[in-house]
Amino acid sequence: MRYIVNTAADRRAMLAAIGVDSIDDLFVDIPPEVKNRYRPLGMGEKSELEVREAVEELSLRNADPHAVIPFLGGGMYDHYIPSVVGHVISRSEFYTAYTPYQPEASQGTLTTMFEFQTMVCELFGMEVANASMYDGGTALAEAALMAERGVGAGKIGIARAVFPHHRRVVDTYTWAAGIDVVEVPYMADGRIDRAAIPAGLSGLIVQTPNAFGALEDLAGLKDAIGDAFLIVSVNPLSLGVIAPPGEFGADIVTGEGQPLGIPMSFGGPGLGLFATRMRYIRMMPGRIVGRTVDAAGNVGYTMTMQTREQHIRRARATSNICTNAQLSALTATVYLATLGADGLQEVAQLNMEKAHYLAARIAAIPGYELAFSAPFFNEFVIHVPGDPQAVRSALQEDGIDVADPRILASLGVNNAIAFAVTEKRTRAQLDRLANRLEALQ
């Protein structure tokens, strides 16, 4: 949609028509502490032409993606996407960004949403899933609010090793809702310190694999937190080789669905996965599609339990998200249907084996060592000799990109770099990275 310019005279006329003197008067009911969090885009008083030129100039700074070998992770990964995925999601009968406005007239779309929910339940080992949320961060934040609705203790525990960008979304949601967030430290192996989990929580958030790539040990964790909700954020692709959180008593399972056939696209759009137990379905946010039969006995699909949504319950709705990321959800559905259970396991196995091969190669170089001893899937952290930014720059000069070490430093891990390996990385590329690190000695 093109931006429609309003002149100063247009704005004055519209303000006069609604009886206010300024733009600021429109937002007088928003508390100052909320408005003070706003950060301007930095464009100042520029014309449309000047803004377009500034944005285009910024875009030219992007590196040629075909000239870079990405070992980037942190929730967004460079996976192979089968050609059939793009073909199916481009069909006009399926092509919608979110929930249809007249859903019952869109039986094809509702069918794919229902199948998506079914696949998420099977993948997570849970009983009911919604039709998707915006991304992994919002899904996790909505899980925190749901736990508070269920328990009401006013306090959420969160493992420090959760992805920082997911943590910021959780902090924003809980701050606005008046919920305290208590950080739980990690142990030397990179996993949550169970001894430091406080009592009196509404929910405990853990992530597996976490920001260090470590696979959390979920066994017995639910029993350790009593009535609090156990919320697990999981990389869905890892479930091709590890047991689902539902088998360990998780109350809510969320995840970022980008690994399921969605391109990295410079960080978005993503796909929020959200599943829970059937007994909590009335507390669950988001859309749910159900299957039924009509008067003639024909199978049909419909939006169900919409009394949870804001267009009916208004301020008492479970969430302000009353739609879904349908095109991304369709993408994940086609991807999972294309691979099947055996294909998902094979892709996950390739990720894990290639990551462990690279980790072993790097750890064998003098001065380099694994930062954590916990088992990992396709992402791991290496302590490097010297300045990690200098190591990163040297790799980038050779066309190899890794995550900014400052992300790890923000989590208390210094002199370290994270590496993420997917099925797309070849043996030659893995050896090229390891050889480049050896050459820096």
Image (cartoon, rainbow, N blue to C red):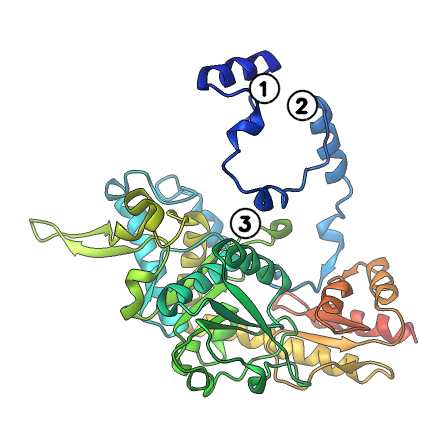
Residue 48 shows which numbered tag?
A: 2
Instruction: Give amino acid for label 1.
Output: Val
Relative side of 308 to 363, left or right: left
Q: Which residue is mark 1?
A: 5
Q: Is residue 367 above or below residue 251?
A: below
Please provide percent x and percent y for residue 231.
Answer: 46, 71
Q: CA distance from mark 3 to mark 1?
A: 27 Å
Instruction: State which mark lies toward you, 3 or 1.
Output: 1
What residue lies at 41% left-to-right and 82% top-to-bottom? 226
Instruction: Read off the residue under disc 3.
Output: 269
- Label 3 sits on a secondary structure element that is loop
Circle 1 Cα neighbour tier, 10 Å, few/some/many (<14 / 14–19 / ≥20) = few
Do labels 3 and 1 touch, CB within 8 Å?
no
Q: Earlier in the sequence, mark 3 or mark 1?
A: 1
The amino acid type of the residue labelled 3 equals Pro
Q: CA distance from mark 1 to mark 2?
A: 8 Å
Give the distance between the C-alpha atoms of the residues marked 2 and 3, in whole angstroms.
Answer: 25 Å
Q: Nearer the viewer, residue 251 or 397?
A: 251
Visible residue check, residue 302: yes
For residue 398, side relative to residue 282 (left or right): right
Which label was assigned to residue 251?
A: none
Label 2 element class: helix
Amino acid at pointer 2: Glu
Occupied quadrant, residue 246: bottom left
Q: Are marks 1 and 2 in contact (CB under 8 Å)?
A: yes
Asked which secondary structure carries label 1, the reply is loop
Q: Earlier in the sequence, mark 1 or mark 2?
A: 1
